[in-house]
Image (cartoon, rainbow, N blue to C red):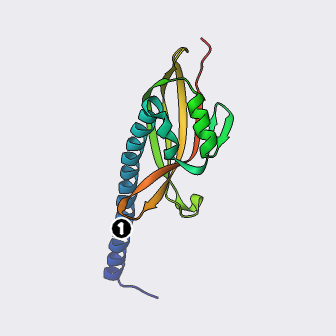
Amino acid sequence: MLVCPAEQAQCRAVLRSCDDRKVWDFRTHVDQSCRYSEEFVNIYYDCMDKKRRNLTRLYLDKSTLVWNGNAVSGQEALSEFFESLPSSEFQVQTLDCQPVHEQATQGQTTLLVVTGGTVKFEGNKQRFFNQNFLLTAQATPNNDQPVWKIASDCFRFQDWNS
């Protein structure tokens, strides 16, 4: 099938417009993800330091936390684990986030959030840490903003030999 040059130009313009929209939509999605991630990180570490009894509310019922290689799963076990930790002072120094492609999560809106910084647990020296969260969006009936819950959490101290 032959297409005249004017039709070709029009088709190219439409395709460019679609590509621009996809890029804009992706940028918007990434920007929203960053805002959600910053809000989440502020809430999470505030709870960890000051309101630990509320921390499990941020986790899905069947979430898994891997703390320095030790797995903890389920609300009750998470609650017991967090209560067993000494009081803490977290200082987040790095934050990175990205949306996880929906093909990898069976259509579930998911964010990967990576933090790093220092933590001082009472009675212990200050240490560097790294923490990775997979957050999933939970629909809420009366709000168009998603509620983010932790599906997976991996915490690790970052110690260097000096």
Question: Relative to the observer, which residue lies in front, 100 or 41?
Answer: 41
Q: Confirm whether residue 85 shows in the render.
A: yes
In this view, 125 is above or below 92:
above
Question: In this rendering, would 138 be left or right of 36?
Answer: right
Residue farthest to the top, as pictured:
162
In this view, 108 is above or below 76:
below
Question: Relative to the observer, which residue lies in front, 130 or 42?
Answer: 42
Which residue sits at x=57%, y=41%? 153
Residue farthest to the right, as pictured:
70
Percent of width and height locating residue 41:
43, 39
Question: In this rendering, would 69 be left or right of 87?
Answer: right
Question: In this rendering, would 18 be left or right of 131?
Answer: left
Which residue sits at x=37%, y=54%? 27
Which residue sits at x=35%, y=62%? 144
Per the image, the residue denoted by label 1 is 16
Question: Relative to the observer, which residue lies in front, 100 or 65?
Answer: 65
Residue farthest to the bottom, as pictured:
1
Which residue sits at x=54%, y=39%? 132
Secondary structure category for the residue under label 1: helix
The three-letter code of the residue at mark 1 reads Arg
